[in-house]
Amino acid sequence: MKLVKFLMLSLIISAIGIACSGGGDTASETAPVATIAPAPAATAVPKPTATAVPKPTDTPVAPTATAVPEPTATSVPPTATPVPPTATPVPPTATPVPPTATPVPTPVLPSADLFTSFSAGGWNASYAIDNGSLFLSSTETPGSKSVGNLNLDFMPAMAGQTHSNLKNQSLGFAYHEYTRTELDINKGTHVVAIPAGKTPFKLDLNIAVSGKGSDGNSFSTTIKEQYTRSDDFYPSAELSIPSNGIPDTDKYKPFSIPAPTAQGLFLATSQSNYDDNYGKVRVNNSEGYFVKKPTSTLRVGLFGDVKSEDYETIRDYIEVLAVVAPDLDIAWANNISEVTLPIHLLSCTELINETIDQYCNTSGPSGGFSDQWGSGNLATGWGFIRVSDQQMGSRHTLTHEFGHAMGLWHSGVDKTSMGPPNNQAGNWAAHDLMVIALIHNSAVVSGQTREEIRVAFNIADDELQGFIDNPATLSNTPDAAWVELGDKLKTQFNNSSMGKRLGR
């Protein structure tokens, strides 16, 4: 009997052990089982006679009563409640914002007593200037009066000056102040802001309404003359030079200038049509074989559509002039009041071409230097340079026009800056440098004749006559010092932004 009870007790303990450790494979499930497992140890079982063990049927323990379910019984499958990415799609056009959702309010016109009547191309209207804007108002639209197109033109003005000489009297600053705004011919009311000055140089404005009728005939009506803008319409008069524009005037020192030659004298006192035909030049309202030389201190400023490389171009030539023309006083201007050689970089427009400069090309690059041939009718300074629409960069044309400002004329010598356009150098070459040095020799003055300079430098008459008789020999290679310096400038050009774009 005791043996039977002992066997029954052993079976019950074994069943409890199986029920607590059943089935769990994960760490979270096996951790609590670890503390229950030692229960069957021998010391935990009392002697059979100490305490009677109830019959196995009194409180039967089913082996699976507390069994831990299989690992998948309560598992959460990763796709049980999937969130499809398109369950609540937001179409990009679900709530489009129409461009006209917030219409521009009708402009508030100035008081009626500020308006002045005018007529342009058969369109009767009135204008007023108020709070920095110009207002045009009419009960009729221009289109209803057979106006094909309509513009509002702002043009620079100086008291007592016509457009024909305005650019010279303003040292070229007038170029920047020509503005044309196209107007809608289907509207009777127009508001246009008065344009701000694009440079510190102050100019009044003439304001005109222009266009063409439906018959193709042009018209233009000036509605306001000599309108003066307040000072706050202009940028600061102070001019700043970027660090890449600061010249190193010791860069080419020491340099020994070769003696003047008949070759240089001929090129300095006559002008070619880019061939071997050389003619007289005009200096100080006279025509002859003269030398042209700046008569004032040169202070340079860049204005308009100026790029970093434009400062580098002028820097490079100020550096070489320090040794080629050591007596020339040339530097950057620090204020608009100091400028004697402004350089204007701009896009030529139809209005500019029609009004003040027929040579300002609207379909491609162009440039020019103007000193009125030394006639003295410029307001101040030596002259001005204009360069426009340089798609590949301004360096090539700017070098050429800057050469004119230094006194160079056109020549028929290939591979020079002043030579034929189809074979023109992007840098001052040996011939250019030779001529600049002669012009800026301290013994030479502007307007001096070829013969006077020949005598001053003791150049043999027959040597000069040789170039006169055969201008083709002007292409002969000059002194080796000029060739060496020209080669340095050629390398400099090839390494410039424009030179790299051209693959030099």
Image: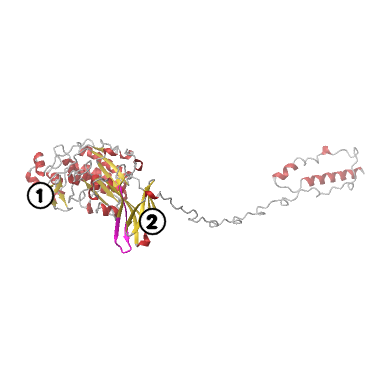
Q: Nearer the viewer, residue 295 or 60?
A: 295
| Chief SS of the magenta region | strand
Residue extending farthest left: 462
Q: Would you call the spot at circle 2 few (<14 residues within 10 Å), some (14-19), or many (20 or more)? A: some
**Tag 2: amino acid:** Ser
| Viewer-closest of 268 and 49 | 268
User: On the image, numbered disc 1 is attached to which residue?
Assistant: 468
Residue under label 2 = 138
Question: Can the viewer see residue 400 in this picture?
Answer: no
What amino acid is at disc 1? Ile
Residue 405 image point, x, y percent: 21, 44
Q: Residue at x 39, y 50 (%)?
A: 112
Coloring applied to the structure = secondary structure
Q: Nearer the viewer, mark 1 or mark 2?
A: 2
Q: Position of residue 28 (x, y in %)?
A: 70, 44
| Membership of 217 in magenta stretch | yes
Q: Residue at x 90, y 39 (%)?
A: 51
